Image (cartoon, helix red, strand yellow):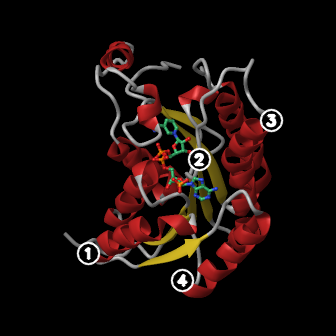
Amino acid sequence: MTAASNGRVALVTGSSRGIGRAIALGLADAGFDLVLNDLARQSEALAEVKSAIEMRGRQAVVVYADVSRKAEVTAMVADAIAAVGHIDAVVNNAGILISNAVDDLEEEQWDSVLDVNAKGTFLVVQALLPHMRARRYGRIVNIASIGGKHGAQMQAHYSASKAAVMGFTRVLAQEVGADGITANCLCPGIIVTDMGRTNLSDAANVAKWEGITALRRLGQPEDVAGPAVFLASDASAFVTGQSLNVCGGIVLS
Ligand code: NAP
């Protein structure tokens, strides 16, 4: 099924698979054209996502960058704007999870998780802000996690990175609101992706997570797409600085 254009373009980082891929396809279904980012090693998977978007009648361009590296992010945003003309919305989805206990956590593990999840979000936002401010329009959607509110053992550094994303977003919303830009977080719960399976190592773990979820099921990547489309679109014009749980009712506040 093809989707009529809504005239908007969205950049989604880490969109070769999992939640990022589902959000990119959801945005295409809602009429967005897409700028698809991931690491260059994901070129094959990203080509599949680009083709799935084009099958929907929408356009997609691919821009490779490691979001934790400022020079690559600056080049990515410049290349994307040159290719598509403007960017209305960004979904900062690229993220990594490395499980380890605080006692054993290596400095490099702390740094890499904070670099991709927190600094990567900041770098992409900072590179896009002049463009969004000049157009007096922007929708910034940062993928945090219920782990940033609650957290699970072995994931203290991941939890810290996602709490950082939420704190960053709350202040960002205040700094950019006067220019017509909103900034919000989504906080997924347990979503069945390569990363999500880290928490689903055996049947007992699956049962545990299903049992504490009000909807009594695990999340699928597509469950995150609808809320992302809402926060990336005009429908959320008066929503900013918020962190919305998309977790089937694990966290109820
Ligand atoms: P995923 O399946 O592991 O996909 C993440 C994607 O991001 C991969 O394509 C990955 O590429 C890419 N990526 C990693 N580092 C990058 C970098 N430095 N620059 C650009 N792209 C990079 O993860 P997911 O489950 O879809 O998670 C997506 C987001 O949701 C993450 O921010 C995650 O923290 C968050 N989240 C997930 C869950 C869950 O249960 N799945 C729950 C809460 C929050 P490589 O594989 O090549 O590294």
Q: In the rendered structure, which disc, 4 or 3, sits on the residue that comes first in sequence?
A: 4
Q: Which mark is residue 84?
A: 4
Is there any visible trace of residue 14 in the rendered image? yes
x, y percentage for residue 53?
Answer: 34, 71
Measured in 3D between alpha carbons, the distance from the residue under mark 2 to the one under mark 1, in whole angstroms, is 27 Å
- Tag count: 4
Tell me which label, 2 or 1, sits earlier in the chain: 1
Q: Is residue 127 left or right of residue 197?
A: right
**Nearer the camera: disc 2 or disc 3:** 3
Q: Is mark 2 within 8 Å of ligand 1?
A: yes
How packed is label 2: few (under 14 Cα within 10 Å), some, or many (20 or more)? Answer: many
Mark 2 and mark 3 lie on one chain; the one further toward the N terminus is: 2
Distance from disc 1 to disc 3, alpha carbons, whole Å, reads 44 Å
Q: Is residue 16 above or below residue 168?
A: below
First along the sequence among labels 2 and 4: 4
User: Which amino acid, by three-letter code, is at mark 4?
Assistant: Val
Q: Which residue is mark 3?
A: 107
For residue 177, above or below residue 202: below
Q: Secondary structure at mark 3?
A: helix
Residue 49 on image: x %, y %: 37, 67
Residue tagged by mark 2?
A: 95
* Amino acid type, callout 1: Met
Image side of residue 193 versus residue 119, left or right: left
Figure check: 206 above or below 62: above
